[in-house]
Amino acid sequence: MSNNPYGHFDDSTREYVITRPDTPLPWLNYLGQDDFFGPITNCGGGYTFYRDAKLRRLTRYRYNEIPYDNNGRYLYIKDGDTIWSPTWKPVRTPLDKYECRHGMGYTVITAEKDGVEVEMRFFIPNEETVELWQTTVRNKSGKKKDLKLFSFIEFCFYEAQNDATNYQRTYSIGEVEVEDGIVYHKTEYRERRDHYTIFGCTRPVDGFDTCRDAFVGIHNGLHDPKVVLAGQANNSIAHGWNPIGSQQLNLSLEAGQEEQFTFVLGYIVHGTENKFDAPFVMNKSKGKALMAKYANNADVDAAFTGVQTRWEDLLSNCQIKTPNDILNRMGNTWNQAQCMATFNLSRSASMFETGIGRGMGYRDSNQDLLGFVHLVPEKARQRVLDIAATQMSSGLCFHQYQPLTKKGNADIGGGFMDDHLWLILSTTAYIKETGDRSILDENIGYADQADDAKKGTLLDHLELSIRYCMENRGPHGLPLIGHADWNDCLNLNCFSSEPNESFQLAGHGADDKIAESLMIAGLFCYASTLFADLYEYLERPEDATRIRGSYDEMVAAVDAHGWDGDWFLRAYDAYGNPVGSHKNEEGKIYIESQGWCVLGGIGVEDGRARKALDSVHEHLYFEHGCVLQQPPYTEYHLELGEVSSYPPGYKENVGVFCHNNPWIHLSLMSLGEGDRALEYYLSVCPAAKEDIIDTYRGEPYVYSQMIAGKDAATPGEAKNAWLTGTAAWTFLTVSQGFCGVKPDYNGLRLDPCVPSDWPEFEVSRKYRGATYKITVKNPNGNNKGIQSLIVDGKAIEGDVIPAAPAGATVIVEASL
Ligand code: GLC
Ligand code: GLC
């Protein structure tokens, strides 16, 4: 057990158990994995939305409130004069017992006060647009208890930005109906919406409220709502202002007695027909049907079991057993849960992302898919097509798109010159996982074409991406950087001295034809190799050779202009001066070009790759990971942009930007450095931070985007947990790096790279319907290199386990 005073892992149930509500930051989990999502903290905070946190938000949350984490799924218990909440917030009455179990797709919060125990199990049933709070109240006091319970949620008017800003309208539009204690939130339903929200309870109610001011009071807070203090609901009907959903339940429990019921928060798409039974009386049939579906506890239990079974099934696609418990715990459970969240939500809705700012990111979602494709390949397929369709016929990609409309976001536009290349990584990962090459023929067209004029298959998009990169190169033959590459803050064409403009979008005259990126060059080498291999698999050797020609051209440019002596340069700025060079005073060495040039195969034979990684070790690595560059920028550099805007040690200015660390881990492993790779992996791994949790502060079960770097005032402090590309890449580090199970076109390539003290490890992998039980032995303490491979008792040449028929179980024994 660790020294974490706030909680611990329960590996047997795949839960993180939080034992104190006052965690160093709110610790989040996600409900839902289809079209309906509910971020939920260990205090019940958060909100619920359908598909898109910006355009279909059902309940309100207040970001950056004081205290943090305000508003959520609340229940008040009035036990005599004592008022408390099982989620601790919003009342914050000290509890006799508190436990929050964040699990796969659910959260259970249990609390006890004065002999009353309340357990709330929050989850979203598979493929449903409903969130359930299954609630059990137990009287353990030894005497009779008369309790009054009040539920609470605050409705959001769907379009979250408008909802949070346009009060001159929103204070006048709120409308509800109540029938049998079920609140039907119907704001805007009379006009352009064909959907509404319901909030009800499966138990008969003793009152309700829908008007926030009536329930809370104008001058009270959520910690002391008037109705709860009074112990009596108002049966208020909201007319404008702020509609809420609240039910009053009076429970009379004998000693030892318990009651169970469920609060139901549902999103109902009614459709445009028969919306009303009478003027102002909505047709509630679908809402009632939903309530009926979960009326019995047994049905709620069954739905919960469904969620658990589905997660077990998904996770069984890849399970590992290595000598390192932290690696197993992350790899088998939480890292995959995080991959699910990033795939579903990109960078939209977390404790740090408000769901309003960004939708899906072009580069982000392509990368997220790499850690997800083994979970639900069919969804990955559609995602690849959706992303590709936001590329324009010139090759330029919309940097972001809204998940609800799937349309590119015109506010941010394109011009991030790495975007298009990531599509090659996601597409090939999908085909290697599934063998489904038909995806290449899907005619998705381009974002600037009318729908009925669609002409452009996915394969055309890949070709275009390569060509676009080759045609947009600068004076050194290296790719132009545009607004920025993966490092959103390396804005070499921006020259912004105006605080009111965006670093990413400012500037950009005709002079953006000079600044170049070595990171994109390395990524191009990696992507073009994948693409050439794909052409070989498609039996188009001439195309493969053509693409390899472009690869050679790019390598030659890097050889001639990209090596700084001990590491790869990062870029050339708009004056043609090097960035990330020993010639610079600050920012002499950057991480991204070391990772990508090595992964792109540059300098592997002549020792530069190894040298670059040794330089990473010397200049960038410390106990909390590898920082992004060194030394930090202490002044704002007009010619570099946002990267020099952060205080030293934070974010892109010498923070540990976790997302790029696994590129180094994989690079190290490509060179056989398994011992160092594990040390580095653990340096950013949240599950390895439990002993320093008050420094780290973030959730110990999911990666953070950033850990403050060695030059920061608070080294080791994490920020931006959950929605980060770190999830997908560390999953690759674990599954394809250490464990070496790499899906390929005709089978599973087995190419592990392990620490020398690993005597043995096992992987159970489902792949195209067959199950592979893989044991790798390492009797001689090696790092890499398969010495023997036995598949179902037969020795195999090489390192590829051939794809077996669906349904088969394949026993693989290998040694290093
Ligand atoms: C964030 C962005 C991602 C970017 C990274 C580095 O994670 O979502 O697109 O690559 O920051 O700037
Ligand atoms: C990334 C960076 C952040 C920057 C943003 C701009 O998320 O981490 O520093 O502000 O991109 O889009």
Image (spheres, helix red, strand yellow):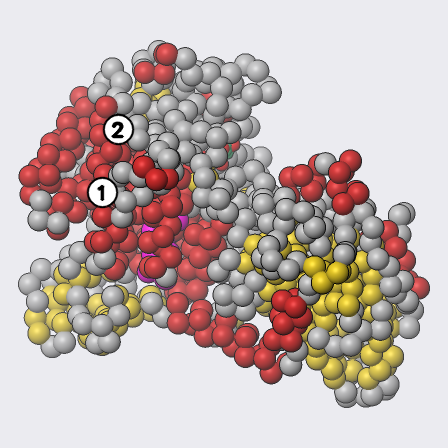
Left/right of residue 514 with respect to residue 559 in the rendered view: right
Q: Position of residue 267 (x, y in %)?
A: 61, 60
Left/right of residue 564 with respect to residue 119 in the rendered view: left
Residue 568 visible in this rendered orientation of the protein: no
Mark 2 sits on what residue? 468
Residue 472 position by quadrant: top left
Magenta span: predominant SS is loop
Magenta span = 368-375
Classify mark 2: helix, strand or loop. Answer: helix
Q: Nearer the viewer, residue 717 or 49?
A: 49
**Residue at position x 31%, y 23% from top?**
480
Q: Position of residue 339 (x, y in %)?
A: 42, 55
Q: Nearer the viewer, residue 349 or 450?
A: 450
Distance of mark 1 from mark 2, alpha carbons?
Answer: 14 Å
The first of marks 1 and 2 along the sequence is 1
**Residue at position x 35%, y 21% from top?**
579
